[in-house]
Amino acid sequence: MQQRTYKGYLLDLDGTIYRGGEVIPEAIDFIARLTVQGIPYLYVTNNSSMTPQQLADKVQKMGIPTKPEQFFTSSMAVAETIRKMEDERQEQRQAAVLAIGETGLCTALAEKGIAVTDKAPADYVVVGIDRSFSYEKMKQATLAIYGGARFLSTNCDRAIPTEEGLVPGNGALTASIAYATNQQPLYVGKPEETIIKLALERLGLAAEDVIMVGDNLETDIACGENGGVDTLLVYTGFSRAEHIETSRVKPTYTIQSLTEWTV
């Protein structure tokens, strides 16, 4: 397919901009080209543990100039989703959110003026990756959901890559609570359309003017497809050309590296 010109970009991080702690060299030039041409972009990530400032610091150290406002995380998406729900309810009292997660999630909720608790009862239960997840946390979430709390999760990632190999992701933690309560959560991160819709609001652009760039068919590309934006699969991370043949998800474009793409 002949390449179109886009007014804005949504960019994955791990596998697209960097791999673990190392920058993908082609990404440095790619971001520089977007910056020179004044094309707005957002890094859209399922990472719920880190704040935009922490992510910006990480990318900055890799040689890519960046600002916290250029990041949109699954924690930010879930906080905005709850804020919208609360605005629609128009309740006088402040809702309580039982949050299982780390700094990124708690900060995102606080920035939206949402009260956070760690014990039932609560109006909402939100689950993000939590490296100190425990039976007590699962118990409190279960009690809150049985008590009527709405159940949300930042993302359904089954496993995440680390230096040790693949380890349980947020989807695994969420699944334990879903099983205990017989309730499925509202997921907001990739591959759900929610995070794309909210990211488009941040960019102030229509879906037809934006492209999602990522390395994973089942998260990045599926998310773009679900959100109604064109997609660019780059073979610098998870997915390979042979994966497309058996996948129901089909990218709009594919490239070997970001140097091949004209912005």
Image (cartoon, rainbow, N blue to C red):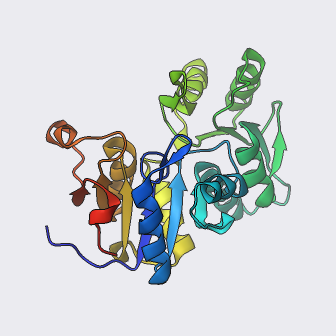
**Along the horizontal axis of the image, is 227 left or right of 121?**
left
**Residue pushed farthest top?**
135
**Along the horizontal axis of the image, is 208 left or right of 155?**
left
Rendering quarter of residue 68: bottom right
Total numbered labels placed on residues in the image: 0
Q: Position of residue 60 (x, y in %)?
A: 63, 59
The front one of 100 and 144 is 100
Vertical comparison of 118 with 3: above or below: above
**Along the horizontal axis of the image, is 33 left or right of 143?**
left
The front one of 257 and 49 is 257
**Residue pushed farthest bottom?**
37
Vertical comparison of 25 with 133: above or below: below
Residue at horizontal 49 percent and vertical 36 percent from the top: 156
Q: Position of residue 131 (x, y in %)?
A: 69, 27
Quadrant, the N terminus: bottom left
Residue at horizontal 67 percent and vertical 42 percent from the top: 49
Residue at horizontal 47 percent and vertical 54 percent from the top: 17
Vertical comparison of 261 with 256: above or below: below
**Along the horizontal axis of the image, is 227 left or right of 168?**
left
Q: Position of residue 151 (x, y in %)?
A: 62, 38
Quadrant, the C terminus: bottom left
